Image (tube, rainbow, N blue to C red):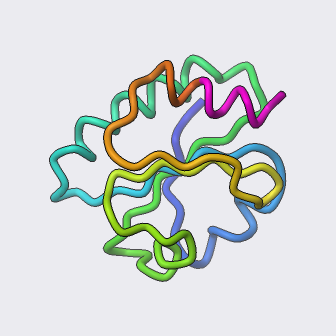
């Protein structure tokens, strides 16, 4: 399972159905650089599931961040069929992120 970057043109179609985990981040953000490998390891751990994992650079897609009320990064959002099911702000440990995604899959 790979983590895909989304921008404004690809976002809505990508998250319209199924379970999606979003990592709102920016390259200049230290905590985001800590979250990135955690996010990728959870994506790998859940590769046998239908969950999709996406990164959204808030500098390149501020309109998407605005739609989700992202004010601090990293922010992780889990969607199910386009509807928000869970949000965490700040560096989120792998087990907590995995539980967020698994709850949406259940």
Image quarter hosting the N terminus: top right
Query: As drawn, is 35 to the left or to the right of 19?
Result: left
| Quarter where residue 31 is shown | top left
Against 51, is 8 above or below? below
Instruction: Please give the range of residues in magenta.
Output: 99-106
Rendering coords of residue 84 (x, y %):
69, 56
Rendering coords of residue 26 (x, y %):
28, 60
Residue at figure coordinates x 62%, y 46% from the top left: 86
| Quarter where residue 41 is shown | top left
Residue at figure coordinates x 61%, y 24% from the top left: 99
Q: Quick check: is 102 in the magenta stretch?
A: yes
Query: As drawn, is 58 to the left or to the right of 4?
Result: left
Query: As drawn, is 99 to the left or to the right of 65?
Result: right
Residue at figure coordinates x 72%, y 36% from the top left: 51
Rendering coords of residue 24 (x, y %):
42, 57
Q: Quick check: is 73 in the magenta stretch?
A: no
Specify the farthest residue to the bottom: 63
Against 37, is 65 above or below? below
């Amino acid at each position: 399972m790979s983590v895909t970057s989304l921008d404004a043109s690809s976002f809505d179609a990508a998250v319209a159905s199924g379970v999606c985990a979003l990592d709102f981040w920016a390259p200049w953000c230290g905590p985001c650089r800590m979250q990135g490998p955690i996010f990728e390891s959870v994506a790998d751990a859940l590769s046998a599931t239908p969950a999709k994992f996406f990164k959204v650079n808030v500098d390149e897609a501020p309109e998407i961040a605005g739609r989700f009320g992202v004010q601090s990064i990293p922010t992780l959002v889990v969607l199910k069929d386009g509807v928000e099911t869970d949000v965490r702000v700040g560096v989120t440990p792998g087990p907590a992120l995995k539980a967020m995604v698994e709850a949406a899959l259940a």
